[in-house]
Image: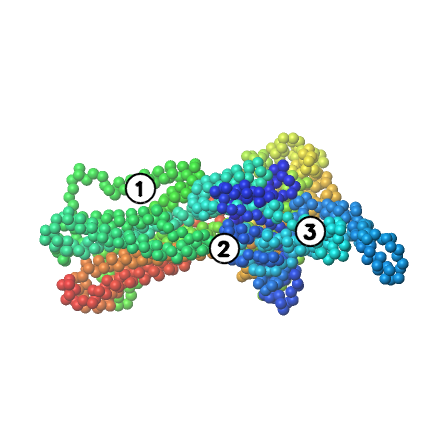
Amino acid sequence: DYFDPLLGMDEQRDFVSKFKYFNTTALQAQMQNNSLVLGSSPRWIMRGSIAPAVKASKASAGGNTERHKLESLVTNILICDLEQEQKLGIGRGFPHRLLGYGEAHVTDSVLSTLGVRAEAGQRVKVDLGLGKLLATFDITPQFLEQTFLASIMEDGVPLRLNGTLITQEFRARGFDVPPNVLPAEIDMKIPVDEVVDMRKLIAATVDGIVNGGLMDLELTVVSAIRGTYEKWPPIGNVVLIEARHFLAELKEVANRVRLMQILNLAASVDENKDEELETTIMRQDTPVADMIFGRDLFSYSFMLLVQYRHRLRAYTSGTRGALDEMVAFSDSVGRDIGFDSPLQMTLPVARALEPLKFLRIFLQQLFNAVVFVLVVHGCITIYALLLNDASARTYEYGMLRVLGLRKYSLGFLLVAQGLYMALPGVALGLLASAALSVPILAQIAEFALVPPDYTYQPAAIFTAIGVGLLIPLIGNMVPMRRVLTRTLGESLDVYHQASTETTVNVKRLEDMGLSVTQTLVALLLVGSGGVIYYIIPMSFIFQDLDLLLSALNAILLGTVFGLISLSVILQPILERCYVHGIMWGADRNLVDIVLKNLSSHRERGRKTSLMFTSSLAFLIFAGTMFSLQADSIIGNIKSALGSDLRVESSRGGLDEAPLAQYLDWQKSRPSKQRIVQDYTWVSWPLWNVDPPVYTTRLGNSVNFPQSWAAEVTAIQPNYLDVAYGEYFVPRESDGCEGRSRGGTQCVRELEKPYDDALKRKTDFHINPLSFTSFDVCDYDTDPYCDNVHKKADSALQFEALVPASLGPALGAEIGTEIVSVIQAQNSRNNPSSRRYLYLQMIPKVLVSKFPGFFFSSYSASLEVGTVNVLIGESTWQALLDLCVRKVRLNATRIGLPTTPPKRYLHVRYVDGTDKDGRLEIINGIKSFVGEDVRITDTLHYVELTAGTLDLLMAFFYVVASIASLLCFFMIFTTFEANVRDNLWEFGVLRALGLTAQQLIRVFFYEAMAMILASITLGTAIGVTIAAVLTLQQNLFTEMPFRLVFPGGLFAIVISMSLGVAGLGAYLPVREMLRCSISQVLKGI
């Protein structure tokens, strides 16, 4: 739902009027001075039908003529004050114009199915479902007939005749009429039955009003609605009508009804007694219609939408903040309308967002982890740049010291140099961020239909400034110490290489103190212990999901970085393997040179390899984790709903015959037009047929540790052929799983002939006192259950699919009986008539997961709901008939079903069915069901989730690009430093005959070996963590193991990594190759 508070009549209040409407004008006046209320708007919603005003021919219907056209469709009729809702921002993305008199917006799928075109002046007839609407006001057809008869039949039809005109007419025809015989005006009342058969007319009128067709609105279709636009919940087909014109449109239709015309005429004559009848007829007054439809519609509202003034701030704040604001807002509205008012207040938006808080917290933690990783990589890159810059300028700093610059002045110079780079960098970074964020924020605002907010968050500014200033200062410390601790001779030695120097430090043991490395490791371990033993339990106690996921995310990131640190051990081995693997032909002679370079550049290359490894590991881990969440959401949707399309009855059984006929016709269509592949039915549980079934329970022979309430439901043999069979996860079976693909045979073997559904079994021991406290069986006459002190000679047993959770709870095993206790009764109001039946249930499969039903292998799941037990239809009917015989009911007299009444209908589409095809089936089914039936299009929710996944995966592509850019700078500076340090060595190689192209390939092979090793380690780490996450999540969801690997993201990251490595190795070498060999040897 898409509204803040929603006001409607509270049917649970005892003093609620039978007329379930209220005066919104009065309520709006009461909330007028509420500073938290932006405004309010009333609404009316009814269930009716829609049909073309003129039956379209095939030539003019438009659209796909292969589609099945229906004559009418069931639809929701939504009556709104569109202008007021536009001001309040209800449905901000609604693109269609305001409606005028006699106009409507209609869902596009409805128009397509009916063959009606929008924006072409075509009209539709809308049946308002007045029968159901009047029923909500407790107005019955009998009440309407009595009201009409009382108003017309008692006094007859009053007439006034002009006596003077009658006298003149008689005289003109030759009749001698004496003067003053007839008065000037003749008032009389004619009995109604002498004018027209009013009883027949009233009956026909009432029948037309109640059953539709007589009071249909004929409206012009303005626009085809292609979505909800956040203006109403996803309730299916919608006809949108303007509330300001609704009563006038209804009045026009009513005035065309014969009975209303007679009522209007009678009332007009009675009101205008001094006026001639002919004049009254010519005036065409409609006093009765005016009295009925001339009222203020807003005084008879069904619901009132109230908009919170600060709704954007509330819904974008944290979970706690949104709750506090909604509590304050609802309290203020409650005070205005009165807490004793018979109105029910709901918060649909807040309630709809409640289950999404887990996803919001997960995404927030994921984004925080991305920022953390990028900041760390940025810091490493800046540190490497500063370190290389200090090493390159060692000679320059030595000359400055020779010229008299003191060490502290040189240190100040290095700090100033760092700030000189940091301050402009921070300023330019903030400006660039603002410039880049404007179009992105605009796109997000347009997508979310909210006003764009381009202001910086304080946390973002402080983080950027802090990182931008502190990292250069901290990064200067190591280069500064290296420069300031060298002697002048070392600083002025141009042939000195930092990578080949050997440093000897002599310290006495008593001067060493604490090891920095050991201290950091100790603090890290202590912090991890505190998180695990204090933070996580505290988050459970206070139900702080943000804190819990933050702690788990920190542990997970620590695990990732720990594995990355350990990968350093394997890096040299993999580099050697890749060198031997990628160098072939003439380049095999260069293997030793490449290996020597890798060894000598190990210290500097370690930072680069760590960056590549961590980038790839994190991107794969984060991408996999997000893909896993999306796949888990889709999997849970499919597992819960069961099939492509689910039709659910909330009361009573579905009408099988017309639905089956329609779906069979769909299955029989030509292959190119076929939409439905197959369908299947699911019954109501046994307890729904009451009497004779009161409860069903499961236990063992001694009812230890307890018995469990059960829902015994019948499914058809083709159930797994229609449902999502991949979510059938058996824990243990009698071998039926191996006799078919996907376990369909397990379901097929449940269906048996009626006479074989219940098998007779001997030696069935049971103590009924374990299940009930009084004697319920008569041993002498009932062989199906035990007396307290005796055992039955025989019992009945049947096969079923049961949850695997009954294994640890009851000790259930395949082939070992479970006691099924059915409590039967012959009257709901007579508990003393209840009788118990004890039967043997033989588990055929212990199920961990089953599409369309809740199954689990954890015994704790038994505490949160009833146990689902699946059997065949013949077994279900046999159990019902057994209960009927047990309590001696006359099944025919009370109308008990002879086949299981159906609660669900599952439909499987043909592969590749598009949205229009799905809507055709949905609209076709709607024409055969009532308001108490809910239709769920599973593929619609799957498409929405997949679309959101694609949108957020684009975020990871941006992150991958940024990480690749940082890696490019890192590898460029690494190889630039390597070239500078080994300049003389490369000159010697050139002098010995190594060509320029060979030298380039040496650097290229070195870069490729290092990057390929990092890719291997990063991928292994990312996949390992992702697999662990998948297994962890499967512990809770019990979904089949499926590692969702982000292949597209992985390919892009690999391509970027290899490109960055090649470019980063080539550019520094290219500068060196431009110099002659002598210049290289001289270091010029």
Q: Which amino acid type corresponds to the residue marked 2 in the rendered image?
A: Gly
Circle 1: is it few (<14), some (14-19), or many (20+) Cα within 10 Å? few
Q: Which amino acid type corresponds to the residue marked 1 in the rendered image?
A: Leu
* Residue closer to the observer: 460 or 822: 460
Q: Which residue is mark 1?
A: 524
Q: Which element is circle 1 on?
A: helix
Q: Which residue is mark 2?
A: 93
Mark closer to the observer (3, 2): 3
Circle 2: is it few (<14), some (14-19), or many (20+) Cα within 10 Å? some
Residue 536 x, y percent position in the rendering: 40, 39
Q: Which element is circle 3 on?
A: helix
Mark closer to the observer (1, 2): 2
Instruction: Report the residue at 62% width, 50% height from top.
Output: 46
Q: Which residue is mark 3?
A: 289
Q: Which amino acid type corresponds to the residue marked 3 in the rendered image?
A: Ala
Calculate the distance from the C-alpha at mark 3 to the C-alpha at mark 2.
38 Å
Among the two numbered marks 3 and 2 on one chain, the one whose residue lies closer to the N terminus: 2
Q: Is residue 504 above or below residue 116?
A: above
Residue 748 x, y percent position in the rendering: 60, 52
Instruction: Report the residue at 70% width, 37% height from top.
Output: 827
* Residue closer to the observer: 1051 or 43: 43
